[in-house]
Amino acid sequence: MNGFLIYAAKRFLQFLFVVFTGITLAFLIAHFSPVDPIEQTVSLLTSFGSTDPQAVEILRESLRELYGTGGPLLEQYFTFWGRVLTGDFGPSLSSFPTPVMTVIGRALPWTVGLLTLATIISWIIGNFLGALAGYFRSSKLLKVAGIVIMALQPIPTYIIGLSLVILFGFIWPILPISDGAQVNLAPAFNRAFISSVIEHGILPALTLVLVGIGGWFISMRSLVSNIVTDDHVVYAELGGVRSRSIFSQYVARNAMLPQVTGLALSLGNVFGGAVIVEFVFNYPGIGKLLISGIYSGDYSLVLGVTTIAIIAVAAAVFVIDIIYPLIDPRVKLG
């Protein structure tokens, strides 16, 4: 027990180090960006007419104080960490005066719902087909499926997304290609809104599934191909055990553990958003929000999204590191 506590403490310190390093790098990248969001905002406000220079300077200083971008770099850095620890990134420049966390809170459910569902579907399909392809290596149907999946694997996400837009939005216009739901429907837990969300989410989810299947398929096929040569599997085959029983009880079960770990990591990454997919389909999630924040120079919004993504991914890795030794005794604590 003491060994596990020491192991958990080490992993927690690693988690803190990763979060600290990631957030610090995000702050430095945003700080040294050539775009000054405060000056952009001041220029936009003064473009509507002549403004007294003294009033402009007061406005500039007020904005810098509001967003914590005034003073020396070290002072800005500590101010930023204060905002991170309190979860207060200030108001969004592009949605002023709405707080950044409110803006993120509106977009987060869309991304989490879409990516969680798509990740689980691609994980199930990819692992199932990969396990079958690794065990039943003589099957022509599985060989064809493998060729198709391998052909899709290197295609960029935006190419697949745009292809689906053209196919189902213009050639056969049977599915919506933009937004998360009908714009005239208010978010509510009713049949009309839920049906609209599902309908609008089909193409983005299909894009993510097609992109994600390949990795799971390849890794699972490789794992199964190695396991079928193990002594206990060979002995089971020689002993007359049915192929279906060998596949389910000896092969697939042993190959699933690394894939479960990979699934947990993938689910941790959903908070980062599917930037390209959400941009292609104009989906109202974190990815689209991040791109909008970058283009509009919304310093606080970009840092808010990035911080949440860093913490989520690091937390997912930490949880896996803690749970893995408990479910697999072969893992050594250290």
Image: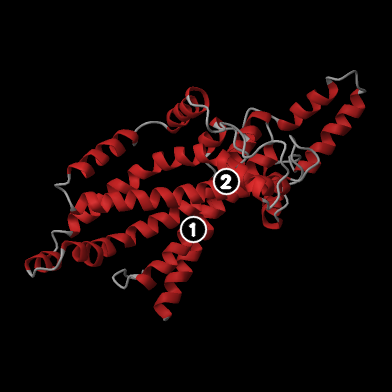
Q: Quadrant of the N terminus?
A: bottom left
Where residue 161 sits in the image (x, y, percent)? Answer: 47, 31
The residue identified by callout 2 is 111
The disc at residue 316 is 1
109 lies above or below 316? above
**Image check: 325 left or right of 34?**
left
Q: Residues within 10 Å of mark 2 (few under 14, many from 20)?
A: many
Residue drawn at (48%, 24%) of the image: 166
160 sits left or right of 96 in the view: left
Residue 254's disc is none
Q: Residue at x 76, y 37 (%)?
A: 95
Q: Tell me which amino acid carries mark 2.
A: Thr
SS category of the residue bearing label 1: helix
In the rendering, at what x and y percent does residue 254 appear? Answer: 26, 64
Report how far apart the C-alphas of labels 2 and 1 lie in the structure: 17 Å
Q: Position of residue 320 (x, y in %)?
A: 43, 62
Type of colouring: secondary structure
Q: Nearer the viewer, residue 66 or 135?
A: 135
On screen, 263 above or below 286? below
- Is residue 20 something that shows in the picture? no
Query: Residue 28, can we see it?
Result: yes
Quarter of the rendering containing residue 324: bottom left
